[in-house]
Image: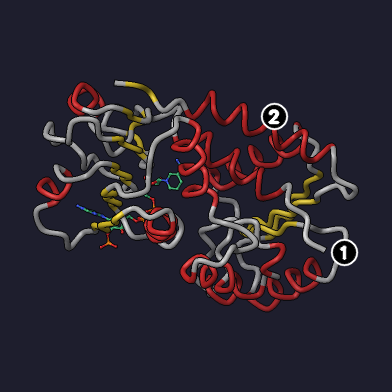
Amino acid sequence: MNLLDGKKVSEKVLENVKARVESLNKQPFLNVILVGDDPASKLYVNNKRKTAEKIGIRSNVIELPAETDENTLLDLINKLNNDDKVTGIMVQLPLPVHINKNNIVKAINPKKDVDGFHPENVGKLVLGIEPYFYPATPQGIIMLLDEYGIQIEGKHAVVIGRSNIVGKPMAQMLLNRNATVTVCHSYTSDLDEIIKTADIIVSAVGKKIVRCKMVKKNSVIVDVGIFRDSNGKLTGDVDFDIVSPYCDFISPVPGGVGPMTIASLMYNASKVYE
Ligand code: NAP
């Protein structure tokens, strides 16, 4: 078993992004909008800001009260869209329930949509046309697989989870790289049987779901899930101790996909479109 060391690879990606930023004529300027005071969201946003600054990306966090209405948020996005200094806009999710997330995502200029969630970017991904931005988590996973020289083409990839931010774009990116892709979700029957046929497993559920010892020999397992177990310890979807002796590569939690997501987001934030 070999570890897919996201911490190590993310450091390399960040170094490359830093060099890329230094070579640009225009300094990237990331604006992150945070609505409400959810402590976890605040922590994520601050981590993004700190990492951005370390690698030369200017960043600004705009904090709005939880009762902010949709039109105020749309006006702010419009202002940022029209500000030539601003090269990247992110709205931290989740948003308060009275705000329609789809309206917000749609309002961001696709050339500044560093999350890659705008319908134009998603549509391009599906059509196999280069989008302005790929969603950070699946893009980070592809970077990790590529760094370890893992072949995707012709392999059977099983993606567990079909969220718009991880599962669906992951499946599409693997398909675009010529994998044969199976997408599993909460209605999938016989998940264990499907897992046994996978060359590459990407699990993005948020529950201990990959327990099966019978992962295929030489398979590659990417664990996206991150949550706290009953003892409060951070853990992933994959039962690492049971599964790891049977596979070829596996990503740990923490230290796998998490740092790659941040690095991949910074890669996006370093892109400047005129
Ligand atoms: P999500 O929106 O809650 O989606 C979870 C998916 O899992 C859904 O598609 C759901 O199916 C599926 N699912 C639930 N129970 C299942 C079961 N028993 N068997 C098979 N599939 C099942 O979650 P998400 O935002 O994609 O995130 C997933 C996990 O990844 C979470 O732990 C999250 O914290 C983590 N995450 C980590 C990073 C990182 O950087 N490390 C980034 C993003 C997310 P249905 O669609 O049928 O409901």
Q: Nearer the viewer, residue 57 or 99?
A: 57
Q: Is residue 143 above or below residue 180?
A: above
Mark 2 beta carbon near ligand 1 (under 8 Å): no
**Residue shown at 36% from the left, 42% from the top:** 225
> Residue at label 2?
15
**Residue shown at 71% from the left, 37% from the top:** 17
- Residue 270 point in image, percent of width and height: 73, 47
Task: Count neighbours of disc 1 (C-alpha within 10 A) and say few if under 14, some if 14 to 19, many if 20 or more.
Answer: few
Query: Quarter of the image containing the C terminus?
Result: bottom right
- Residue 132 point in image, percent of width and height: 65, 62
Amino acid bearing label 1: Asp
Circle nearer the N terminus (2, 1): 2
Q: Label 2's element? A: helix
Q: How is the image coloured?
A: secondary structure
> Spatial distance from mark 2 to mark 1, Cα to Cα?
26 Å
> Residue at label 1?
84
**Residue shown at 58% from the left, 73% from the top:** 120
- Residue 87 point in image, percent of width and height: 78, 57
